[in-house]
Structures are given as structure tokens and as C-alpha cells.
Image (cartoon, rainbow, N blue to C red):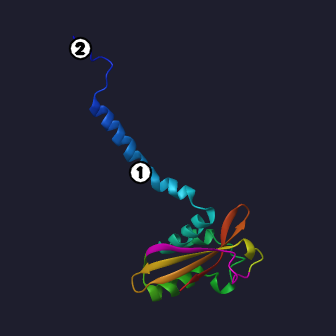
Amino acid sequence: MRRDAGKVHWTVWIFLLLLVAFAGIALVPLISQLTKPAYLRTATQFIVAIQQNKLDDAKKLMDIEAVPEDKRDLKATVEMATYRWGNIERVELMEVVNAPAELKHPKASEAVRVEFHLQCYLSPGYASVYLVPKDGSWVVVDYILQ
């Protein structure tokens, strides 16, 4: 007489293996967001907020006193850019430059420039976001939308 008590059927093991695999695949985007540098997360949030036309959220990421006066009105600047581009459809990271020389800011040596390629409805666009550390986080001190 053969004893089957205590044995787990092989289909249960396959089901558990597939469950673990799908859970791992579902968690990969969350883990990849957490492993990005803080300045890259802030720059991406800024550009995505502009893409989604959530300008209040984008302004929260800016240090308004440090932004040049002609760019403090984010709504007007974005409207001018979207007039040329159309709606922003996709945002792609291009390059990260440490300590950009063209930034006029007291903490320019600690600054980072994050460049994005913007796929838009009418024509391709380009965005640069300049960030500096402030109070333990990164803030936008300048941006270029071309």
C-alpha cells in the first residue's frame, strides 16, 4: 500500500512558482523607481507634470526665488512651448550632466542638468531641467523648453 499523505501535488508547486514569477514582474517598475537617484525622480516628476498639464504639481517642485524671472510664470512658458509642439505624447530621458557650466546659481557646482527628448503631436521637443540640492531634497531652479 502506497502512502500519499503529506505530499503536495506537482500542479500546486507549478502554481506557486507562477504566482511568485508574476508578483516579481509586477514589482519591477516600483523597485526601478526607488533605485533612481533623487534628482532624476524630481526631474521626471517635473516633466511628467508638465506633460499631464498639472502645473501646480510642477510648481511645487520649483524653487521660485531661484528661477529666472522670465520663467517664473510656468503656465505662460508651457503654453508657448505647446503652441509649437502640440501635446506632449512621450517623454524620454536623454542625458544627465553634473555641474553644468551655464547655470548661474550659488550652488552651481552641486547642480545637475537632466535632458529629455519630448515626442509631441506636431514636432519633437527638447527639455532641460536644472536641479540643485536644497534642505535634503532636489528642487528645480531653471528649465528650458525648446
Residue toward you, 138 or 14 = 14
Name the residue located 61 percent from the left edge and 72 percent from the top edge.
Answer: 59
- The circle on residue 125 is none
* The furthest residue to the right: 106
Amino acid under disc 2: Arg
Residue for badge 1: 26
Instruction: Tell me if mark 1 has few (under 14), some (14-19) or many (20+) residues whose alpha carbon lies within 10 angstroms of its own.
Output: few
**Image location (x, y in percent) of residue 31:** 51, 53
In terms of sequence position, does the residue under pointer 1 or pointer 2 come before the other?
A: 2
Q: Quadrant of the N terminus?
A: top left
SS assignment at label 2:
loop
**Image location (x, y in percent) of residue 98:** 66, 73
**Image location (x, y in percent) of residue 91:** 47, 73
**Image location (x, y in percent) of residue 76:** 56, 84
SS assignment at label 1:
helix
Residue 141 falls left or right of residue 125: right
Residue toward you, 63 or 119 = 119
Residue 146 falls left or right of residue 13: right
* The furthest residue to the left: 1
- The circle on residue 2 is 2
Q: As displayed, is residue 16 above or below residue 22?
A: above
* The furthest residue to the front: 1
* Residue 48 appears in view: yes
Amino acid under disc 1: Ala
Q: Which residues are magenta?
A: 90-104
User: Of circles 1 and 2, which is in front?
Assistant: 2
* Residue 53 appears in view: no
Q: Residue 99's image quarter?
A: bottom right
Let me know if residue 96 is in the magenta part.
yes
Q: As displayed, is residue 15 above or below residue 22?
A: above
